[in-house]
Each structure stands twice: as structure tokens, then as C-alpha cells.
Image (cartoon, rainbow, N blue to C red):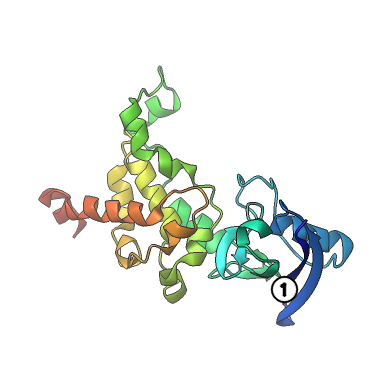
Amino acid sequence: MLGEARVRVRRYEPGKGFYYREYRVKVGKYTTVLDALLRIIEEQDPTLAVRYSCKMGICGSCGMVINGAPRLACETTFRSLGTTEVEVEPLYNFPLVRDLVTRFNELLFNNHRRVKPYLIRKDVKEQFNPVAEYRQTPLELAEFLAYSYCIMCGLCVAACPVVYEKPSFIGPQALAQALRWTVDSRDEGGEERLDAVDRGDGVWACEYVGACSKVCPKGVDPAGAIQRLKIMLATRTPRKILKLT
């Protein structure tokens, strides 16, 4: 047992605003921050609002700022933090609903849709009525596999200083997925996606701080994906560049 932990939560209530509430909770060697928050809700304060689902680092629902860094609460143990003094805040950059619950519609889900995150085929009839599978080599799969691990937890968007300064920025999550589908050998809609991100609030707004890649719990590396998109745009053929203007 680690003993008693002090959990300080930055809470938000519509009409009341922000305030801090401190709780004391018993924690053990493998207790996660999410475990502690759920214990607080069950034993001390049922009004505390927390979003979670799988508790296994798969769904991405329990993203929050823990000791100053965006993390998944279900994967963050007190032992890994090296302290029993923990401060929890809602994810940065996102609109707040209540306490630790933020709304993803505008800055995550809508921007994700903008990059058309699905296979696009020129032959629409063939796409929806295929006669065979789309085959890939291991090397073709490796081109996009790491980017497909995104669980849309929003941590990269919360860590991005450009999103803070410029909320219209499409964001690292959407840009990483734009690359994921564009480099997929089965896809034929790359030009459409490049057109969609070749904007001042698209790929060119990124200042390559790298915070998005640092906080990603799945190692997706959005910062690296954005640089690849920039290279792809900068090396487009003159005919395609002329078409964009």
C-alpha cells in the first residue's frame, strides 16, 4: 500500500464557475487515478462528474490533465507518478460540460470528419459492391499502421499550444488521420484530403512543438504525421499546385 493520497480536483459547474475541491483516498501499488476518482464518487462525493468507459486504455474516454499533463486516468497509477499528491483538471482547449467532462464535438469529432477518414475509391459502385478484398503487402500496411492506433482520446488536442492560440486550427488528431488514409495503398482520395488540409488553419498552422506526440498514449506521433503531410504538399507536381490556386 502507498497509503493515503491527496487528490485535488479542479471542478466546474455551469452558473458557478471553477473551484477546487480536495479529497483524501486510500491508494495501493496499482491504484490508478481513475480508480481513486471512482472511489471518491462512490464513498465521498457523488456529484463529481467524470467520463470513463473501458478502464483499459482502449476507449479514450477518461482523458484529463493529471499533474499538469494530459493523460488517460485509467492508465496513470500513483506509483507511476511517484507521488500521492495529485491535481486533476479537465482537458485543456475543449469546451467544458461539467467538472472533468469536456465536449469533443467541435475540436475533435467535426475536424476528424473534415479529413474524410475512410477509404475513398474512384469506382463508387465497386467500393460498395466489391468482388474481392483489397490486398496489401506488409510494407504497405506498415506505412499507416501506427497512425491507425488513434483512439480519439483528445490528449494531443489538449496538449497543442496552437489549438489554444488558434481554435480554428484543425488540430493534430485530424491531421494524423488525414495522413493515415492518404498513405493507405487501398485509398484513392489522397488529393481530396491534401486539398482539405492545405490551408492556413490546416497543416500550415502547425509550429512543430511536438507536445501532441509526447502525450499520445498509443505512440501515434501526430507531429511526425504533420511533417509528412507538409512534405507531400510541398512536392506536389506543378499541375496539381496550379489547380489549387
Quarter of the image with the C terminus is bottom left
Q: Quadrant of residue 214?
A: bottom left
Question: Residue at label 1?
Answer: 8
Q: Secondary structure at mark 1?
A: strand
Q: Quadrant of residue 174?
A: bottom left
For this orientation, the residue located farthest to the top is 131
For this orientation, the residue located farthest to the right is 43
Q: Position of residue 100 (x, y in %)?
A: 68, 66
Q: Nearer the viewer, residue 179 or 207?
A: 207
115 versus 89 height, above or below = above
Q: Position of residue 229 (x, y in %)?
A: 29, 52
Which amino acid type corresponds to the residue marked 1 in the rendered image? Answer: Arg
Q: Residue drawn 33% across and 57% down?
A: 197
Q: Position of residue 226 (x, y in %)?
A: 33, 55
Quarter of the image with the N terminus is bottom right
Circle 1 crowding by C-alpha within 10 Å: few under 14, some 14–19, many from 20? some
Is 104 positioned to the left or the right of 168 in the image? right
Q: Residue drawn 53% across and 59% down?
A: 155
Q: Residue drawn 34% across and 62% down?
A: 202
Q: Nearer the viewer, residue 236 or 144?
A: 144
104 versus 21 height, above or below = above
Q: Position of residue 122 (x, y in %)?
A: 31, 34
214 versus 57 height, above or below = below
Is 31 positioned to the left or the right of 72 in the image? right
Number of numbered markers: 1
